[in-house]
Image: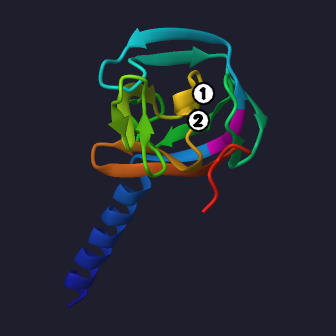
Amino acid sequence: MRFFALIAAFLCAASAAEAQVKLGAEIVSYGIYTTGTVTLADAPDLLSGKFGHLSGVTNVERTTTIPAQRGLSFGIQFRFTGPAPGATVLYTVTTQYPKPGMTNDAGKTAFRESTSDLGSVGEIAYYGFTFDHPWEMVCGHWQLEVWAGDQQLAVQEFQVVSPNCPTS
């Protein structure tokens, strides 16, 4: 009986150690940002047709209420946690738009959009959205998500508001 208790204790310790090294992400900041350098890349699957890689972002207001203003950027900064500092992480970031979705000038509508990137465990990354076009300023509940495979690692909700928003 003692042998089985030792095996059970070993399996529990192994499971606890495995849980400690599991990949995760923590949101370290969120809200309104200023951006530094923007490098645009073609992204034909996105409504805007472009994806911006940003450097030099600064959180200027920690808030979940976002005014729909042209040129305003909002988002999250997050850090991957897990097995080995510096380990490379392939991740996907997703933006969920409010109903009735976002419709661009060409008439294409999306309810969510995703893109993938590489990050590192321990490094802080930024993911966000900038209102570049009037059709992007959709009022309501937005959600930014960070995924690794089919595992959601982090989520942050925002409420985009404007005096021009319809009221329900």
Q: Position of residue 85 (x, y in %)?
A: 48, 33
Q: Residue at x 20, y 83 (%)?
A: 4
Task: Give the residue at the far right of this rendering.
Answer: 60
Other-residue count near label 2 (Cα within 10 Å), few / some / many at <14 / 14–19 / ≥20: some
For image coordinates 64% across by 58% down, the residue present is: 167
Residue on which disc 1 sits: 131
Q: Kindly report which numbered mark, 1 or 2, lies closer to the viewer in this rendering.
A: 2
Q: Residues within 10 Å of mark 1 (few under 14, many from 20)?
A: some
Q: Image quadrant for the N terminus?
A: bottom left
Q: Looking at the image, which is closer to me, 60 or 2?
A: 60
What range is drawn magenta here?
28-32
Which amino acid, by three-letter code, is at mark 2? Met
The circle drawn on residue 137 is: 2
Check contact, mark 1 vs mark 2: CB within 8 A.
yes
Q: Looking at the figure, which quarter contains the C terminus?
A: bottom right
SS assignment at label 2: loop
35 drawn magenta: no
Q: Is residue 165 above or below residue 54?
A: below
Q: CA distance from mark 1 to mark 2?
A: 6 Å
